[in-house]
Image (cartoon, grey):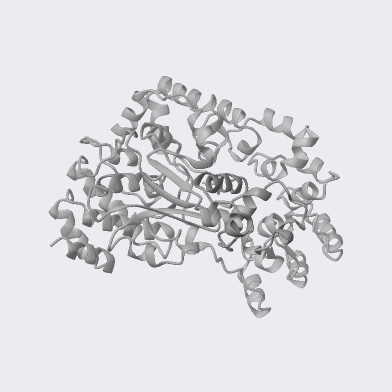
Amino acid sequence: MPQGLYSDQYLKALIAEKPKLAKEFFTAIAESEYVGEKEIISCIEVPDWVLVKAGVAACKNPNFPMKNFEEFLGNEETLTESYWNLFNYPHLKKEHIKKLSQHSNINVRGLALAHPFGDHDLLLALLKKVIPENDHSCHVITNRICQTVPLNDELFAYLTSVHDFESGSRTIGQALWDNPSLSDLHKAELVLSEITPKGDGNSFWDDHRENLISSVPYFQLFDSSFGYLKAKFDSIPAFSPQVTQFFNSKGHPLSVLLPEESEAEIKVDRYVLDDLNSAGLLNRLFWSELCQRDDFEIYRRNAYRTDDLFISHPILGREFKEADVDNATHLGGVFIFDNQKWLIGNQELPADQAAWELRAYEQSMATIVEDGTYEYLGQTLIAMTFELPELPEKYGFELTEDAEEWMIDAALEFAEPDSFDVSADLNPLFREVLSWSKTPDAKKLVIFEFLLLGLSEEESKLRSDCIHFLGCMALHDSTPKSILDKLAKIKDPLIDEVLGSRS
């Protein structure tokens, strides 16, 4: 399977067995603004007419029609703005590359010369011109050329001689380590020259992949929230119930969340664990019912560029409570609050923080107006009473509740998100369909096995999430004893402490 593409076995079965229903499914996708999202354009089962609707980003899919691709190539604006997408097309021809190798745009020319059909002697000449001039307008050297061009000895020798040239986020030497044509001899030379790969500081978050396209109807069925993609997702017309019924019959992994028995075998597969652990589905499955306990509630906390949502609980919530506020998003079960439908969020700007936003800390009106800002002078005077409580008596005014609200309203215009006191709770009007207590025991066991599979991952957000949800499972009164016994065998300190709290 080419990199960045995947096959969806459930959608493949729908196409083979229910072609009319599959056509209805694809029509709903094609008529929506969601058609260009990665799980759509990356699926090799998606037909050409849907990909055309998705636009230039879909060129990476082998089903994208040649006719439409060549129309993009012939459009100068599309070519110069979307060359990354166009060079992902798997059916590029020699005549395409020959023409693109003569293009005036240095990035287009560089990618063409680096292509397997390109002229690598001319590529070497181009690099010897661009790199010594420190020309960073060629964005594709480290981000594409060094990672993909077939390496001969002459080209390799030159690139290693300028290995410290940096473009984007890494050097030529670091990028060479990703080149599949790198021979064992080349690798040895890199090691001897002390040219090492760039350490991946973000590997903790890099385990996630795009969801299966066949999961989209379930997200719709569960009324999932999609953050910045909300408008696009909500534009998808309602799928026929027959679509999810068919996927259920094939053992789709998200069918495990439906509170009804299943005759189909649901295969526990690491590849689809991401679908299960997405869009807050597992949070909803456990938290919505655990919040009925006296010691368990939703807990929202914000900081600079952070608005985390988690839970308060003596055991499961302890690490979050004690963690650095700016760096707690990585903990298991934590996610960024973004007005999810199943939650209600509240925020309030306290009076003392509003006063701070109006620069009351300057303690001098003269200092505040030096920059020529006079729009909020009255509110600023009120704000300064928080730093100088003697001001009302000195100037003969009384600080009333209305005045305080007037000051707060002014500060709302430019207050930073982390200035607000925030909270969240379950939305009582949300029609929740996910329920651990209503999930059949056979499905509970499958969910347990999915989460257990996540524990075999290296340190990652996914692994942390799985530990948290196994802890929720250990806490929930509706977890059968057979699964509690399996939880005890994991020998995880957090899970063991939760199990111990049950007695």
Q: In which quarter of the image is residue 201?
A: bottom right
Classify residue 270 as left or right of residue 163.
Answer: left
Image location of residue 256, percent across then percent down: 28, 41
Instruction: Please tell me which residue is depicted at 38% across the width and 42% down the height of the picture.
Output: 343
Task: Please tell me whether residue 222 is drawn above or below residue 373 in the rendered image.
Answer: above
Classify residue 9 as left or right of residue 374.
Answer: left
- Name the one closer to the observer, 278 or 68: 278
Q: Could you tell me which quadrant the C terminus lies in?
A: bottom left
Classify residue 271 as left or right of residue 131.
Answer: left
Image location of residue 81, percent across then percent down: 74, 41
Image location of residue 138, percent across then percent down: 79, 55
Q: Quadrant of residue 98?
A: top right
Instruction: Please tell me which residue is depicted at 59% across the width and 55% down the height of the picture.
Output: 383
- Name the one closer to the observer, 95 or 9: 9
Visible residue check, residue 463: yes
- Name the one closer to the observer, 139 or 344: 344
Image location of residue 61, percent across then percent down: 58, 38
Task: Please tell me whether residue 318 is drawn above or below residue 416 in the rendered image.
Answer: below
Instruction: Please tell me which residue is depicted at 31% across the width and 54% down the height of the picture.
Output: 469
Visible residue check, residue 150: no
Q: How many marks?
A: 0
Q: In which quarter of the image is residue 68?
A: top right
